[in-house]
Image (cartoon, grey):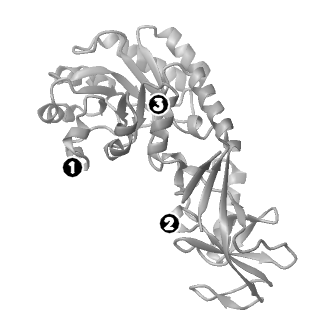
Amino acid sequence: MTLTLHVDGERWSAHLHAVAGAMPGIVPVIKGNGYGFGNRALARRAGELGAGTVAVGTYTELVDVLPLFGGDVVVMTPWRPFAAASVRPERMYDPRVVHTVSRVEDVAALREVAPPGTRVLIEGETSMARHGVDRHALAAVAEDLGDLRLEGFSLHLPMTGDNLAEADRWAGVFETSRLRGLATGAPVLSVSHLRTAELAALAERRPQLSVRPRVGTALWLGDRGAFRVTGQVLDSHQVERGERVGYRQRPVPAHGTLLVVSGGTAHGIGLEAPTSASTLRQRATSVAKGGLGAAGFALSPFTVGDKQRWFVEPPHMQASMILVPSGVPVPAVGDEVEVDVRMTTTQFDAVDVR
């Protein structure tokens, strides 16, 4: 009764090592649901790859990652005065933890509660406009660091646009800022969303900075062919058109077989992020799907007979009801069916690496 992620272990491992080898100084990102694998599993994998530093999304993720990864751990969400409530001080201020600072007003508050030598990166405000210090405020942040240890800088870039140009502009700002308290050696420039060639170009242009690429999706999920997701058939019923079924007693639109399949809202089935459609065709598809949803029809991620099948009603917490039309071979109870899911929003019952 499981929703299972099946992994071709040899193929996945080859991909991980290829990406790590092409990106010197790679900082694997470990956050959220661990890209479907779980954060603890990815912490172990990062160590096997030889990474010296990983990045987590939030302070609460330190609990899983710190004990299983022996190197440094960067927290990408900037430190805030209320962050202390999320994790015990011995975790938060572990000597291996590197904090991100993105506001001038947070520096003094961090200095008051953190042990001397606590390590920080200053994040610059990029065109993402999410977190970051304006370039004119860099000096003010550095002046207030006191006995905090400034390791370098951080940039979170968008997924589109001329990211190399923006990263290079910020690198120039960092190089010329001559901030006090900067750690000896080449300051770190931790950066996201640059391709391999762009990283090489940036490192060549800015040899005084140690460019460290943060990589999540492209590392862990870059070879989607290494993964397969299945749900198990839990029950099967013959249904007639117009017959009312399910919690909401909706009429079945056609003769066929109602399958109850493992995988529901607790796993992330039937849940999706807002669309990022940008072309006219993508928007038209979204409108069409929205219209079907409003009419009570929604395409499920479960495949039977080489086609995705319709939900009979919205997914339940741990199972879904789908309709297989008459004439299509029906899998038996206990059989597995393929499921097309978004890895970053799905919680699997089991991860089978072979």
Residue drawn at 71 percent across, 91 percent down = 243
Residue 194: % across, % down: 55, 26
| Residue most extreme to the bottom | 243
Question: Looking at the figure, which quarter contains the N terminus?
Answer: bottom right
Image quarter of residue 171: top left
Q: Amino acid at mark 1?
A: Ala
> Label 3 near label 1: C-beta < 8 Å?
no
Q: Is residue 173 left or right of residue 81?
A: right
Q: Considering only order in the chain, which callout, 2 or 3, is on the residue closer to the N terminus?
A: 3
Front residue of 176/18: it is 18
Q: Which residue was labeled with disc 1?
A: 85
Q: Which residue was labeled with disc 2?
A: 266
Kindly report the distance in space between the C-alpha atoms of the residues bearing marks 1 and 2: 27 Å
Front residue of 125/322: it is 322
Q: Is residue 59 left or right of residue 247?
A: left
**Can the viewer see residue 332?**
yes
Question: Looking at the figure, which quarter contains the C terminus?
Answer: top right
Secondary structure under badge 1?
helix
Q: Considering only order in the chain, which callout, 3 or 1, is on the residue closer to the N terminus?
A: 3
Kindly report the distance in space between the C-alpha atoms of the residues bearing marks 3 and 2: 30 Å
Front disc: 3 or 2:
3
Residue 47, which numbered label?
A: 3
Local crowd at mark 2 within 10 Å, few (<14), some, or many (≥20)?
Answer: some
Front residue of 57/41: it is 41
